Image (tube, rainbow, N blue to C red):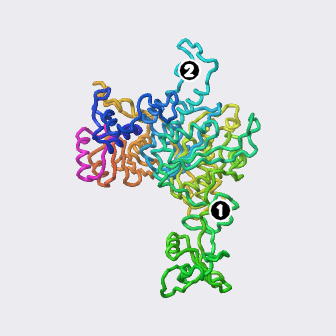
Amino acid sequence: MNKLKMMSADLTAHNIDKIAELFPMCVTEVKDAEGNITRAIDFDLLKQELSASLVEGPVERYQLDWPGKRESLLAANAPIAKTLRPAPKESVDFEATENLFIEGDNLEALKLLQESYLGKFKLIYADPPYNTGNDILYKNNFHETAKEHYLSTGQIDAEGNRYVTNYSSNGLFHSNWLNMIYPRLRLTRNLLQEDGFLCLAIDHNELANFISIIDEIYGEQNRVGIISVVHKPEGRNQAKFFGPSNEFMLVYAKNIEQAKLRKVVLDAELAKEYQFSDEKGLYKRKNFIRLSDGKYSLRENKPSFFYPIYVNRTNLVISMGDGEGFEPIYPITQSGQERTWKTTPETFWQRYEQNDIEAVIEDGKIIIYEKLREDQVIKTHWIDKKYHGYHYGTKLLDQLLGAKTFDFPKSLYLIKDILKLMTDTNDFILDFFAGSSTTAHAVMQLNAEDGGNRKFIMVQLPEATDEKSEAYKAGYQTIAEISKERIRRAGKQILESENIHEDWNRDIGFRVFKVDSSNMKEVYYHPAELSQADLLEQVDNVKADRTPEDLLFQVMLDWGLELSLPIATEEIEGKKVFFVAGDALIACFDAGITESLVQTLAAKEPLRLLFRDNHYLDNDTKINAEQLVKQIAPNTELKSI
């Protein structure tokens, strides 16, 4: 019986799959370190296939390089034996919510999400450490020491003697930050929809490097824009030269040919002009009669633009031909002057089919209007006061939590406007440097306003708060605790507000998960190391402190199921049985599995069925289970752990 691997995705294996699609002749088989046959790439053959376009050896090329980059790439691709353990007591509405909060290292979290959320996110946002010199960086296991850096860059010899007068400590400073951010950014690309966006906040310290590595990962051609956000208009007074008053948002598309920003108006004053809305967004009306003073606005000078548009007065449907209930409308002003329409009949009809033309009755008269949306091109310099970090970030959060708990949170309205621009009402949003969870707050707020069902996944390291800080004194021992409490309070506050859209499902909950070691013992991954005594004792391959719920969610991750799917339990033949999204997965982790139970569950014809490998009643039952499932539910995938 096939077993689940119970590890995160092996991205190197996925890359081999991609190469195999293009160059199947370059995939071969070799023995790994343990003597097992495994797939590999014949690099000599691959080089022959690409011989005209190879860059090798000392040939100069355009790229950003730094100490640790190769190890950083390996770190991104390597699978890990980790899991996400549910924490229902820290969650809100665990059973029904579609939102997630993941507590742990975001590199590990991103790896664990690779299969369940492959190509699922419309927007991935992050506000990573800015590398100002005071940041606590997420440390990968290949973190380079200062001595290693100085040795590798030739600044000291093996005895520590300096070769140069001044240390270039800035090199290590930047390298460590790049080694932290690079593997995480690589993992984001797999998670985006083809029309999805990556939006990253940064200041001037790492702007140049940040652009270079995102260009490398996403492709320079997919860079949508670099937005300057004025978040501190008074500037930083302690600056020696210029007082920085802005930060940057780097926006990339996974595929710029498919990505589209939504038609929205972000400027409050401009928005007042756009009083109408449809499924394409806000618009304003303008009479379709050409009313300018030019000679071509008159019928005699442009007769082909003088034609009837037929409108049904009852339902305001427009036609280009006469028919029962339709009356002709000509471009004639109230004074009786014969003018022209703004386009030919063909272009008019195209615009009508694109929902950019409408008929309206005013004072008993039918008026033809065009819907103007083109004034809404979003500029790259955002200066609205609603983006100011102190008033709409720090102060807003302090008031919500009743204490100063977090330094420099983003403006709630900044994130909300990003969501308006880059997401539709049912999209998934990921923030893998959640901080105080401004993104989760903004998602709930926007859903409440427009009736959307956007789902968020927040990821935050349980970084300890300073014992002298107000946050610690207020009871928040980690930033993750601040983040979760903000979501709880923000959700409650939004529910109590008056302006709630009638279509909103009122989901203010979130399932909490914590990155942890695998639920499986080491013997699960290396069964060949079992001794004869272990076999005789029927060694349990699950850790003693793990629950059936822990196992269920690791199984869901392995099988690529979303962690927000609804879960039900039933007692069948004395066993606890889990049903995930109805028939998407049926799992039972209890001991003593009988043929009768296998038959009962197989009869439900689930897509996936799972039992523990050593929890069948006996070996014959285990052998017969496969045959039973094949006979009763041939389309069901049966596996074990």
From the viewer's perspective, tell me whether residue 285 is left or right of residue 577. right
Choose mark 1 or mark 2, whichever is in front. Answer: 2
Q: Residue at x 52, y 34 (%)?
A: 64
From the top left corner, tell me how far across and down residue 229 is, in percent.
Answer: 66, 47
- Report the residue that reaches farthest toward the bottom: 324
Q: CA distance from mark 1 to mark 2?
A: 59 Å
User: Front-most of 503 and 509?
Assistant: 503
Number of numbered discs present?
2
Disc 2 designates what residue? 150
Disc 1 designates what residue? 499
The three-letter amino acid code for the residue at tag 2 is Tyr
First to last magenta residue range: 612-641
From the viewer's perspective, tell me whether residue 493 is left or right of residue 29. right
The three-letter amino acid code for the residue at tag 1 is Asn
Q: Classify mark 1: helix, strand or loop.
A: loop
Instruction: Examine the image and state in which quarter residue 306 appears.
Output: bottom right
Q: Residue at x 47, y 41 (%)?
A: 187
User: Front-most of 635 and 386?
Assistant: 386
Instruction: Examine the image and state in which quarter residue 327 appears.
Output: bottom right
Q: Residue at x 64, y 49 (%)?
A: 489
From the viewer's perspective, tell me whether residue 112 is left or right of residue 284. left
124 over 362 or under it: above or below = above
Quarter containing the C terminus: top left
- Report the residue that reaches farthest toward the top: 159
